Image (cartoon, rainbow, N blue to C red):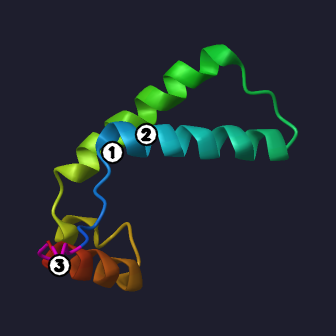
Amino acid sequence: MTDVKVSPTPIQRNSLDVAMELTQMHKQLMELMGMDFESTDIAQTYAGYYALAQTLQRQSVDSLSGLVSDEILAVIRRSESSY
């Protein structure tokens, strides 16, 4: 039997996954701050994070330079070059 070698591929999350994770973190933060997070807020919060993720997905790294620190931009550039 032949050994098959598989190289792991970096996990790529889509905008739906990112929006879900950010919504969950938002809910946890609200609860930690002792604030109510109504079920009606979930859809609106998710939609906002999804729109943000979609917008940022279409942006170049250089267009984020005024919003994100140089250290984070360097990490993004490194991760993009590994694809």
> Magenta part mainly helix, strand or loop?
loop
Please tell me which of labels 1 and 3 falls first in the chain.
Answer: 1
Residue farthest toward the top in the current orientation of the protein: 40
- SS assignment at label 2: helix
Which three-letter amino acid code belongs to the residue tagged 2? Ala
Whole-angstrom CA distance, mark 2 to mark 1, is 7 Å
User: Which of the marked residues, 2 or 1, is nearer the chain's N terminus?
Assistant: 2
Per the image, the residue denoted by label 3 is 82
Which of the labelled discs sits on residue 19, or is there none? 2
Marks 2 and 3 close (CB-CB < 8 Å): no
Q: Which residues are magenta?
A: 1-7
Which of the 4 quarters of the picture holds residue 24? Answer: top right
Q: Which residue is mark 1?
A: 53
On the image, which quarter does residue 41 sit in? top right
Q: Amino acid at mark 3?
A: Ser
Question: Which residue is located at x 33 percent, y 45 percent?
Answer: 53
Crowd band around label 1 with a 10 angstrom C-alpha radius: few (<14), some (14–19), many (20+): some
- Which residue occupies 42% across, 27% down? 47
Residue plotted at (26% across, 71% down):
8
Q: Is residue 16 above or below residue 4?
A: above
